[in-house]
Amino acid sequence: MKAKGLPRSVAELRARVGKVTMRGGDEVARARRMLDVYLETAATHGLAVEDVAREIKSGLPALRIGGAELTAQTDSAPVRLAACAPGCAFCCILAGDEGAVILEAEARRLHEALVPLAGAPDGRAWHSRACPALDPETRMCRAYDARPMICRTYVSPDAEACRQISEGTPAAGPGVLGAQRTYLTVQALGRAGLQGAVTVPTYALARIAAAAVEGRDLAAALREARHKPRTLEDERARLTGAATD
Ligand code: SF4
Ligand code: SF4
């Protein structure tokens, strides 16, 4: 049975996404075009709208589209000039109340990667606000292959600027690649297209990681880490002022 309010087909979902109004100008237009291609492909392959809605809820279109853009940015100036190196982890000190915004598929993957490490000393033994996925001795990410988009897109030409930011002092240099904003905008558009039918939450990276290393199961982790609905839009607005490209 279809969820109440769900579009009757992928074509209808495409039409809804096409009509979503959202702040963000050209960036929204670009993200909308890419999500439209994704939905067109899903329709061509005969996917049911319920399956596509599930994919959007988990964040798969956003991760695929943002991931492709990130790959294309591998040779960009911010990446070439980055001072990022193994063991440099000021960016893993998570400022703000939201604990970094991630999508459901990322939350599941991160939790799965960290559960085997439950009980071991975690990043908070190095710094009280460090990500629990961090190794407190080596300051390397213990969930590197499962790290979310925000960890893959944040770069800096100067580690000292990152240190200052981690202490609450503004500094120029660090920022996210455009792929991060694309991924969040695709997710926001997909969520708006499903409004009234499917709830599409975001989650706090830090809380998912904490729940995993403290031995709590996935259901509890998702419950504890779930953001308020407006967090996604707040994060999009925040990143517009923190872009590095
Ligand atoms: S973003 Fe900053 S703290 Fe993180 S690895 Fe790069 S230079 Fe180091
Ligand atoms: S998941 Fe890994 S890379 Fe991302 S903030 Fe946590 S320790 Fe750092």
Image (spheres, grey):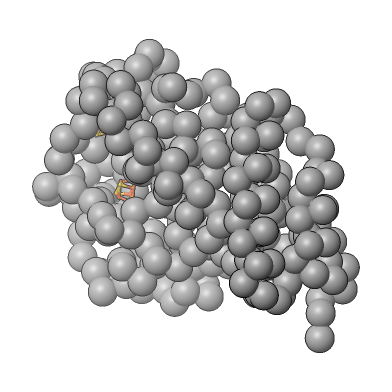
Q: Residue at x 12, y 48 (%)?
A: 137
- Quadrant containing the C terminus is top left
Left or right: 122 as drawn, with respect to 7: left
Q: Is residue 50 visible?
A: yes
Give percent across and percent down for residue 95. Answer: 44, 35
Q: Quadrant of residue 32?
A: top right
- Quadrant containing the N terminus is bottom right
Left or right: 136 as drawn, with respect to 78: left
Left or right: 92 as drawn, with respect to 222: left
- Compare residues 186 and 155 and report the one nearer the observer: 186
Considering every residue shown, the one lying at the far right of the view is 5
Q: Is residue 244 above or below residue 124?
A: above
Give percent across and percent down for residue 61. Answer: 56, 57
- Compare residues 31 and 23 and report the one nearer the observer: 31
Q: Residue at x 21, y 31 (%)?
A: 84
Give percent across and percent down for residue 188. Answer: 67, 46
Left or right: 90 as drawn, with respect to 26: left
Q: Residue at x 60, y 45 (%)?
A: 34
Q: Residue at x 49, y 64 (%)?
A: 105
- Compare residues 113 and 208 and report the one nearer the observer: 113
Tally of marks: 0
Considering every residue shown, the one lying at the far bottom of the view is 1
Give percent across and percent down for residue 98. Answer: 54, 44
Considering every residue shown, the one lying at the far front of the view is 44
Q: Is residue 54 visible?
A: no
